[in-house]
């Protein structure tokens, strides 16, 4: 019986050593790998009071540090506007907009004069709110 206990103890020790050795190897390989980009430390920015609304004030203070200016790797300027709006802005600037087919019944909505409709809406609003 003593021999069996000794045998079991040595087997357990051997298994534990093997497991510890494998775990140490994994940790060492993880430590040798280059560290991926660390999150940049946030600059301490003095909180300013932009408005009396505390939630809006917090949001404005968060964006005040200017991180949003370089989203996408560099500053967004008018040269990069096509990236932002999917290429349509450049077409508009070059007057390469495809004209609307005048025979299309939907084109009437684009050319219709809506000034009378707006005046009636303003009159209704004045009647409703007494302004």
Image (cartoon, rainbow, N blue to C red):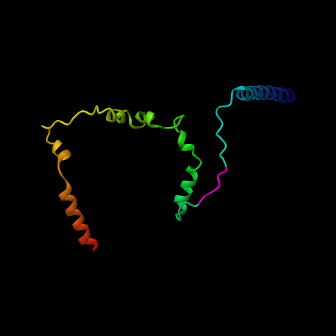
Q: Which residues are magenta?
A: 44-48
Q: Position of residue 95 (x, y in %)?
A: 29, 33
Q: Position of residue 9 (x, y in %)?
A: 83, 29
Q: Quadrant of residue 23?
A: top right
User: Viewer-proximal residue, 94 or 14?
Assistant: 94
Q: Is residue 108 above or below residue 123?
A: above
Q: Position of residue 59 (x, y in %)?
A: 54, 54
- Mostly what secondary structure, the magenta segment? loop
* Residue 118 visible from this viewpoint: yes
Q: Residue at x 44, y 37 (%)?
A: 78
Q: Is residue 69 above or below residue 2?
A: below
* Residue 89 horizontal side relative to residue 65, left or right: left
Q: Is residue 108 above or below residue 91?
A: below
* Residue 60 horizontal side relative to residue 131, left or right: right
User: Viewer-proximal residue, 124 or 54?
Assistant: 124
Q: Residue at x 58, y 61 (%)?
A: 49
Q: Is residue 125 above or below residue 9?
A: below
Q: Residue furthest left?
A: 103
Q: Position of residue 22 (x, y in %)?
A: 74, 26
Q: Residue furthest right?
A: 2
The C terminus, quarter of image? bottom left
Q: Quadrant of residue 88?
A: top left
Residue 12 magenta:
no
The N terminus, quarter of image? top right
* Residue 17 horizontal side relative to residue 34, left or right: right
User: Viewer-proximal residue, 98 or 57?
Assistant: 98
């Amino acid at each position: 019986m003593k021999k069996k206990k000794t045998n079991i103890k040595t087997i357990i020790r051997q298994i534990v050593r093997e497991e510890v050795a494998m775990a140490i190897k994994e940790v060492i390989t993880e430590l040798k790998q280059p560290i991926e980009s660390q999150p940049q430390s946030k600059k301490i920015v003095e909180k300013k009071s932009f408005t009396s609304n505390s939630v809006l004030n917090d949001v404005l203070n968060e964006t005040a540090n200017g991180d949003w200016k370089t989203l996408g790797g560099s500053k967004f300027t008018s040269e990069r506007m096509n990236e932002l709006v999917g290429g349509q802005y450049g077409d508009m600037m070059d007057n390469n907009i495809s004209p609307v087919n005048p025979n299309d019944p939907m084109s009437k909505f684009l050319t219709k004069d809506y000034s009378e409709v707006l005046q009636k809406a303003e009159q209704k609003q004045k009647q409703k709110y007494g302004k």
